Amino acid sequence: MALSKVKEFGFDTVACTSTGNLANSVSAQAAIAKLKSYIFIPANLETGKIVASLVYKPRVIAVEGNYDQVNRLCTEISQKYKWAFVNINLRPYYAEGVWAESVSDEEVVETIKLLASTKGIFTETARGVTLGVAKKLIEQGIISKDESIVICITGNGLKTQEVVLDKLGEIVKIKPNLSSFEEKLSLEVENVYQS
């Protein structure tokens, strides 16, 4: 939503203050829209959260300070330069996408598992919320089951794997021989063979 407004308002540069997901989204969408992009992050942000932005070639600015200090600096920059800051001077449009319903932690985990098992995508918790809310809105009839929609899944599940770790299937340990395999998995193998 915000990136659509960036183009509508005639900005050629988009920016944001972020500690991960927003930076990734803005970087990706700016690349598609062929806009210059600046991502402002706290200097101590983990590398894994930065790489997913860097791949889209934004200008990443690491500020020696906490998120609030980065945000204050960006507010000053937005007042001096004609840049579209998604979460500052375009905040009303950024909030348009926020993301209309809520989901519980359990629903988030179930949605993460659903996306992984049906689409082969392992996402992190924030995108589990996005998909979980979309699922609820479809179930409530707010979004038609026949309607085509796009859901942006921008965060990788490796960032928050501890959330699902104890809610997944168990690992079966066997010895390196066929009899151990058949002993541990005899019923399972028999059912697969018969079907």
Image (cartoon, rainbow, N blue to C red):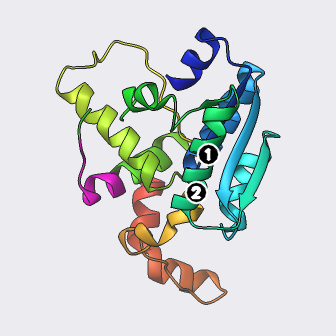
Instruction: Report the amino acid beneath label 2.
Output: Thr
Quickly name the residue at label 2.
19
- Is 58 placed left or right of 170 in the picture? right
For the residue pair 103 and 179, the one nearer the viewer reads as 103
Task: Check disc 1 and report the residue beneath it.
Answer: 74
Who's the residue at 46% across and 73% down the image? 162
Amino acid on which disc 1 is placed? Cys
Q: How many numbered marks appear?
A: 2
- Which residue appears at 74% of the width and 20% of the height? 12
Percent position of residue 71, x then y:
55, 51
Q: Are marks 1 and 2 in contact (CB under 8 Å)?
A: no
- Residue 64 location in percent, x, y? 70, 67
Q: Tell me how far mark 1 sits from mark 2, CA to CA.
A: 14 Å
Left or right of residue 12, residue 179 in this image: left
Q: Residue at x 41, y 48 (%)?
A: 128
**163 relative position to 60: left or right:** left
Relative depth, front residue between 126 and 57: 57
**Secondary element type, mark 1:** helix
Q: Which mark is residue 103?
A: none
Q: Is residue 64 above or below residue 151?
A: below
**Is residue 146 something that shows in the picture?**
yes
- Give the residues in magenta: 102-110
N-term-proximal mark, 1 vs 2: 2
> Pointer 1: residues within 10 angstroms few (<14), some, or many (20+)?
many
Q: Residue at x 39, y 40 (%)?
A: 130
Q: Is residue 172 magenta?
A: no
Q: Secondary structure at mark 2?
A: loop
